[in-house]
Image (cartoon, rainbow, N blue to C red):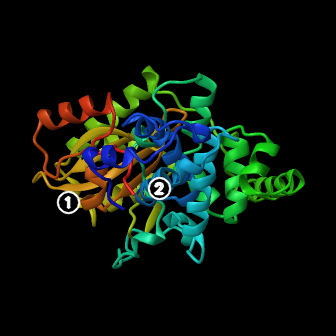
Amino acid sequence: MKRSSTSETTAAAGGATADGGGPRAPQGELADRLEAHRTELTGYCYRMLGSAFEAEDAVQETMVRAWRSYDRFEGRASLRSWLYRIATNVCLDLLKGSQRRARPMDLASASSVDTPVGTGLPETTWIGPVPDQRVLASAGDPAETAVARESVRLAFISALQRLAPRQRAVLILREVLSWSASEVAELLGSSVASVNSALQRARATLAASGDTAADASPQQLDDAQQALLQRYVDAFERFDMDALTALLHEDSTLSMPPYELWLRGRDDIVKWLLGPGCGCEGSHLVPVTANGRPAFGQYRADGEPWAIQVIETTDGRITALQCFLDTERLFPLFGLPMRYGGPATEGAVASQMEGRPAGPRSAPSP
């Protein structure tokens, strides 16, 4: 769903009323109030849906519904709670009849270097990456920020997709957003007992999957990790396989959606890069952030975009290279140009990452 222009939303604002059916809100006031919740709502919808694009569509639909029905919002709940109720209903509608999204390692065992890459699976198969600035607030309580970062990790998003949609909503609201059981029950039109039961089942499912937000080790970009990433960029851009091998954990993984193929083990990863992946030689890496982790936009030697790389590290070694090849949609999402332009490209992306993400951010018109 496309976002409307500012002029269109201003024209529509005249029909909105203030909380509790009071006087009409000044033009633009409602748009600002709704917009203030966009980032956290996008994070919520992304956890629910596993796709940055579906999440943004869901939030836009939430804004449309809120805009159209605001004159009936009587202030019996906070605006934030009301928006979350709408967003939850939108997500539950989208999840009806849909298959759960996954990572390559969720679908099959590790491949060998000689395994054909294949033709790729539809976009709806995969959990996709999301820029941090789209889903994580730029400021807040450090403990809450750490939980938020861990709860958008690709592995955790994958674990969430194993839950039934309502269980998923309950767990996110209770465990990630720290809502009370009574607040969640009111949002879902359910009972506290039902919410607690759903949470217990959701926790059991996540425990069986071996991945929870609470159990994950928070990763801060400290000096040691920054140095590790700098060594990685240097080794990858020089295509120095000895240097790269020294940075990879022995059980590190490489995945490349939309392809089902994935590899485990640094030896196989290096062999793949020197074989089927030899086209990566001469690449340029532009730093971004995704899913609470360091990431890079990878351009091939000819300047054409090739992948968004999301990097996982543990104990000073790289444990996962998650490469997403849908560059036509992902590079614009991350504010990356469709052709590498040298240091100017990196500077422009760095400047954008310090502010809001690119793209229109206006509230919708009816």
**Circle 1 residues within 10 Å: few <14, some 14–19, many ≥20:** few
Q: Is residue 240 visible?
A: no
Seen from this angle, which residue lies furthest front? 23
Of residue 245 and residue 314, the one placed in the foreground of this image is: 314
Quadrant of the rendering where the N terminus is positioned:
bottom left
Residue 189 versus residue 101 in the image, above or below: above
Residue 156 vertical placement versus 177 (above, below): below
Single out the mark in the foreground, 2 or 1: 2
| Label total for image | 2
User: Is residue 154 something one can see in this rendering?
Assistant: yes
- Residue at screen point 67% across, 55% down: 169
Q: Quadrant of residue 237?
A: top left
In the rendered view, would you say 338 is above or below 344?
below
Q: Amino acid at mark 1?
A: Gly
At mark 1, the secondary structure is helix
What residue is shown with label 2? 55
In-front residue for pair 219/345: 345
Residue 100 in picture, x, y percent from top left: 57, 69
Which residue is pictured at 18% across the width and 47% down the height? 337
| Numbered label attached to residue 279 | 1
**Mark 2 or mark 1, earlier in chain:** 2
Q: Is residue 217 left or right of residue 23?
A: right
Q: Position of residue 66 (x, y in %)?
A: 51, 51
Q: Secondary structure at mark 2?
A: helix
